[in-house]
């Protein structure tokens, strides 16, 4: 990469390629600089430190995930939308395990807009179930935990039994969609 082409976005691009190829543990400013063909101090013109780079990377990953699930649910509603959303989430994680593993799940102002978009897509998908306000947030948390948890375990080869993973995920999707019809506040 030519020095003139270096920008914050370009540094994030290089860092994401590094993480994709070598895993999240390989991320250092020195490694990113080496891949960019510059000295490490040159990166400081574009990112303050490794923490800011990770934050920018997380924002980009959340944007990509939002794009993926947004496209999947477009024109769909109810069970069809939830199935499409969960399938897209799983596919993104399994296709990009190292990148997704770099996604910081903690609150971050750099990632707030992208994270809000993901939540907004989920909440919009839940309207067909009559879920709004805090009920929609509870359901969003459950749906996110289900899709994220399964996909992360799958990407990490955490499922070792012979049963088909697609069948297991289909069951999870059916459980989630059936659960969305239950009262949020059970008794």
Image (cartoon, helix red, strand yellow):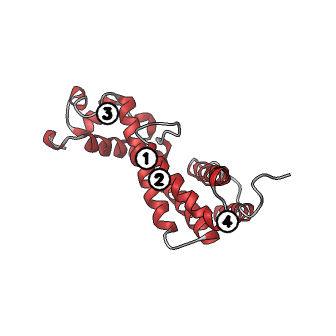
Determine which quarter of the picture holds residue 174. Answer: bottom right
Query: Viewed as shown, does residue 44 lie left or right of 130?
Result: left
Q: Residue furthest bottom?
A: 75
Q: How crowded is the residue under tag 4: few (<14 C-alpha within 10 Å), some, or many (20+)?
A: some
Screen quadrant of the N terminus: top left
Q: Residue placed at 20% from the left, 33% from the top?
A: 38
In this rendering, is residue 83 above or below 52?
A: below
Question: What mark, if any, has residue 113 been given in the picture?
Answer: 1
Which residue is denoted by mark 3 in the rendering?
31
Q: Which residue is mark 2?
A: 117
Which residue is more in the foreground, 146 or 156? 146
Tags 3 and 2 touching, CB below 8 Å:
no
Secondary structure of the residue carrying tag 2 is: helix
Relative placement, left or right, of 25 versus 138 is left
In percent of the image, x 41 and y 52: which residue is there?
63
Along the horizontal axis of the image, is 147 left or right of 108?
A: right
Mark 1 → mark 4, Cα distance in angstroms: 25 Å
Q: Nearer the viewer, residue 60 or 125?
A: 125
Left or right side of 51 for 9: left
| Spot occupied by residue 146 in the image (x, y as percentages of width and height) | 65, 53
Q: CA distance from mark 3 to mark 1?
A: 28 Å
Q: Position of residue 34 (x, y in %)?
A: 25, 34
Q: Secondary structure at mark 1?
A: helix
- Residue at the spot 58% in from the left edge and 61% down from the top edge: 86
State the CA–CA distance, disc 1 to disc 2. 6 Å
Question: Which residue is identified by label 4?
Answer: 129
Instruction: Mark 1: give few (<14), some (14-19) or many (20+) Cα within 10 Å.
Output: some
Residue toward you, 170 or 81: 81
Q: Earlier in the sequence, mark 3 or mark 4?
A: 3
């Amino acid at each position: 990469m030519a020095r003139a082409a270096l920008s914050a976005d370009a540094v994030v691009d290089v860092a994401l390629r590094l993480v994709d190829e070598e895993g999240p543990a390989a991320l250092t400013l020195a490694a990113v600089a080496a891949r960019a063909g510059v000295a490490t101090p040159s990166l400081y013109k574009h990112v303050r430190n490794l923490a800011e780079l990770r934050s920018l990377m997380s924002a980009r990953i959340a944007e990509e995930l939002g794009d993926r699930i947004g496209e999947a649910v477009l024109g769909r509603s109810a069970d069809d939308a939830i199935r499409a959303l969960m399938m897209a989430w799983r596919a993104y994680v399994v296709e990009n395990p190292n990148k997704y593993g770099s996604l910081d799940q903690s609150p971050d102002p750099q990632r707030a807009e992208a994270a809000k978009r993901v939540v907004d897509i989920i909440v919009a998908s839940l309207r067909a179930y009559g879920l709004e306000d805090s009920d929609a947030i509870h359901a969003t948390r459950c749906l996110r935990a289900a899709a994220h948890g399964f996909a992360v375990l799958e990407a990490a080869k955490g499922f070792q039994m012979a049963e088909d993973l697609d069948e297991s995920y289909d069951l999870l999707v059916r459980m989630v969609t059936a659960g969305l019809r239950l009262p949020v506040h059970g008794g």
